[in-house]
Amino acid sequence: MVLFKTKISFGQIALGLILAGAILLFYWPALVSLANSLTGNEDYSFGLLLPLVSAYLIYLKWPKLRRHHWQPSWMGLAVIFLGFGIYVLGDLAAAFYFPPFSFIVVLTGLLWLAGGWALVWELAFPLFLLFFMIPLPAMVMKTLTLPLQMISSKLASGMLQVIGIPVLRQGNVLDLGVRQLQVVDACSGLRYILSLSALGLIYCYFYQRSLWKAAILLICIIPAAILANALRVAAMALFPALQEGFWHSFSGWLIFVVVFALLALVNWLLDYLKPPVSPPEEDAGVATAGAAETPAAPRPSYTPYLLATLVLVLVAGQIALRVARAPAVPLLQSLDNFPLQLGAYQGRRTYLDRAMATAVGADAYLEADYTSPESEPVSLWIAYFESQSQKVEGRVHSPLMCLTGGGWHILESRIEEVAPGLPARYLLMEQGGSRMVVYYWYIEQGRWLASEYSSRLFMGWNGLIKRRNDAALVRLITPAGGDVAQTRERLTAFARLLVPVLPKFIQE
């Protein structure tokens, strides 16, 4: 083994500090936004601790890192370039989670540059752990939350019935006769699954290095967290004092203790059934290795690597900032000119108050109620965004998120065609005994899209190709009578009235 003399000059240190400052300056808005998101989101507040855990793991490895003499690699530049590309794609797609992801990729590239793949592999787990502090997309969270709410409600209802407590479950509402308990999003158990998964990874890192055993432990976390959360919901139904205040927080903390104890128990059983093989001592032979070492040779200078990386960061950073900001594409004409007479429907426009309009963040919007003597009224909402950004108030909001956040429950959901080649998301929703039918879709450069995921992908791709990420949201709502099929036909007929009108306002 060849050892290299470690001698880093003052100039190299200065270059390294300038490089670190340039990267931090570029990602500072994204990191501040991430920190604000973590502090304001109880589901992900644990993410604030993960950088500290990663730093501690690196501290534990520091003696080994200092002892080894790493070889720099130009491959790190390619990884850094990839990180900036991810940033551009995320900005064009108005995806909040892309910039933090990009930052971790750039960190990986810097490590690769400093010590090659060997250094990246040595620090792979502390880097991987950082990904768990990036919140999942809101649509993914909602997609996971809804079924978990139902599962927790069913399990809690079953637990109460087992101990002889009569309970009637309606969706995610438990009716005990004397009181009702609604299993809201926060009680779905998802926050426990997310935080316990990160905790389980850290636990496996320290106490279980066998890959198949670690996989079993991590898989066990999900059903254990769901069962523990259902038990907590059942307890809240029995004891109203657990629904708020200290006891509510304490019962949540107790779930972590119970699941973590179960994790330790399963780990002990796995090691008991299949005892681990003691790994060889990491430092074995270090004392005798010196005799076989070849004469020390000078380490390759870091100066060209640092200079090249600094140039890449400065140039690619400026390019990324320019490319990621798609120019604004205005409407062909103002929505004030939108026709209020559509077929047999006569419309009446309404306006949002200033605070709500600011929260929506649209560059232009239309809210109008259309009535007809022969049918139920239809509410039309159009929100247009000339250019979307990563700010929440500067991008399209999913009606699915807004409506469910307002207390409406989804009875049916699917994608249908309101006209050939023109898809829309169909929702049948209920709240307090009232039902309504909803159609909504996105229009991006003339294309109708009914899925939030396809909308984001198309927006990012189109932003790179056409330098456009403008988009419009169109939403229709009408009360659902006894015949839902007839209500859908009526709303479909109204949507077809919009087909020749929308292109007169929204650019293709």
Image: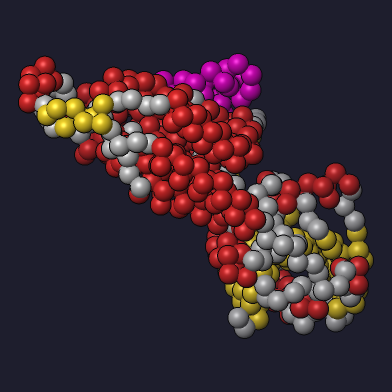
Q: Quadrant of residue 257?
A: top left
Which residue is at a point 19% across and 27% down the rendered structure image?
296
Which residue appears at 26% of the width and 26% of the height?
5
Region in magenta? 234-257
The x and y percentages for residue 3 are: 19, 29
Name which quarter of the figure residue 62 lies in: top left
Asked if residue 242 lies in the magenta stretch, the reply is yes
Residue 57, placed above or below residue 486: above
From what the image shows, is residue 323 above or below residue 375?
above
> Could you tell me residue 238's position as x and y percent?
55, 25
Main SS type for the magenta part? helix
Is 430 displayed left or right of 15 in the figure?
right
When the figure is inspected, residue 224 is found, relative to residue 83, above or below; the finding is: above
In this view of the protein, which residue sits in the foreground, 209 or 244?
A: 209
Q: Specify the quadrant of the image occupied by residue 175.
A: top right
**In what quadrant of the picture does the N terminus appear?**
top left
- Is residue 450 visible in this depiction of the protein? no
For the image, the number of numbered tags is 0
Q: Residue drawn at (69%, 47%), measured in percent from left and top? A: 392
| Residue 280 belongs to the span the image colors magenta | no
> Which residue is more in the foreground, 504 or 4?
4
Left or right: residue 199 versus residue 359 is: left
